[in-house]
């Protein structure tokens, strides 16, 4: 799957027809994340994922590993994002965080649409914004927030063994994880990626807000 104009039109069209569900919870803080479609390029390697032999135009999702020095969710997989300022829309916040965390500045014309909100156990109501990032060859991780930047091929998220659904003692709903190479990503990030796969690539309306997070992601 290549990052082409036809793919952009396909995803924008499916998001345009998708009935996005906004959620809120008492005392939750509003946040936004950017699910950025980007060329695979030569991003940081992961066990079990082959590196491209040259700069690749295959479609990928931009992910980060959070800095181990952060107070909240240190070292975890994440989409670039953070709290929404009072004067911002979720789209504006997602683009701002994308620039602050990985040095990628995009215009509002790059926005393709929204996926469903997800209320986390740690007290955030997160709106995922799907954006078109193109080549984005020059990325720079924020020294204070990001340990590493990764371009994960979209094909990796289409694996037949995904998602993984694990029972957890304190909830009737399972924990959702997405396998990546020889490792995995947990909800809420995994929930956004899974819904992106289902809605934007497979063309299936799939809800994810009910899935649980593992205990370590609730802090």
Image: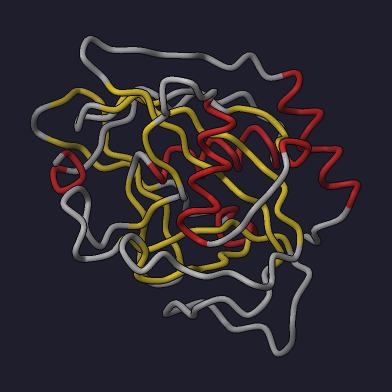
Q: Quadrant of the C terminus?
A: top left
Give the farthest residue toward the front.
Answer: 87
Residue located at (29% from left, 23% from top): 29
Q: For this view, does 103 lie left or right of residue 54?
A: left
Residue 206 placed where, x, y %?
55, 26
Give the farthest residue toward the bottom.
Answer: 53
Considering depth in this image, is 26 or 118 the residue closer to the camera?
Answer: 26
Considering depth in this image, is 47 or 172 the residue closer to the camera?
Answer: 47
Q: For this view, does 64 lie left or right of residue 196?
A: left
In the rendered view, would you say 117 is above or below 131?
Answer: above
Residue located at (16% from left, 25% from top): 171
Residue 148 placed where, x, y %?
41, 71
Quadrant location of residue 112? top right
Residue located at (55% from left, 54% from top): 157
Residue 153 placed where, x, y %?
62, 64
In the rendered view, would you say 173 is above or below 179?
Answer: above
Residue located at (44% from left, 43% from top): 81
């Amino acid at each position: 799957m290549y990052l082409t104009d036809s793919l952009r039109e396909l995803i924008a069209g499916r998001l345009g027809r998708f009935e996005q569900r906004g959620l809120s919870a008492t005392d939750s803080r509003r946040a936004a994340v950017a699910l950025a479609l980007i060329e695979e390029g030569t991003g940081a390697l992961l066990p079990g994922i082959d590196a491209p032999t040259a700069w690749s135009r295959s479609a990928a999702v931009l992910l980060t590993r959070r800095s181990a020095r952060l107070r909240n969710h240190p070292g975890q997989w994440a989409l670039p994002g953070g709290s929404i300022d009072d004067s911002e829309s979720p789209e504006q916040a997602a683009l701002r965080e994308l620039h602050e965390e990985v040095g990628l500045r995009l215009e509002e014309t790059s926005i393709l649409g929204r996926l469903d909100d997800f209320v986390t156990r740690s007290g955030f109501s997160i709106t995922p914004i799907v954006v078109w990032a193109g080549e984005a060859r020059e990325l720079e991780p924020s020294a204070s927030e990001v340990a590493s930047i990764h371009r994960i091929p979209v094909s990796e998220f289409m694996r037949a063994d995904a998602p993984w659904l694990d029972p957890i003692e304190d909830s009737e709903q399972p924990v959702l994880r997405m396998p990546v190479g020889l490792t995995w990503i947990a909800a809420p990030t995994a929930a956004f990626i899974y819904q992106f796969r289902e809605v934007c690539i497979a063309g299936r309306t799939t809800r994810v807000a009910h899935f649980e997070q593992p205990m370590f992601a609730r802090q």
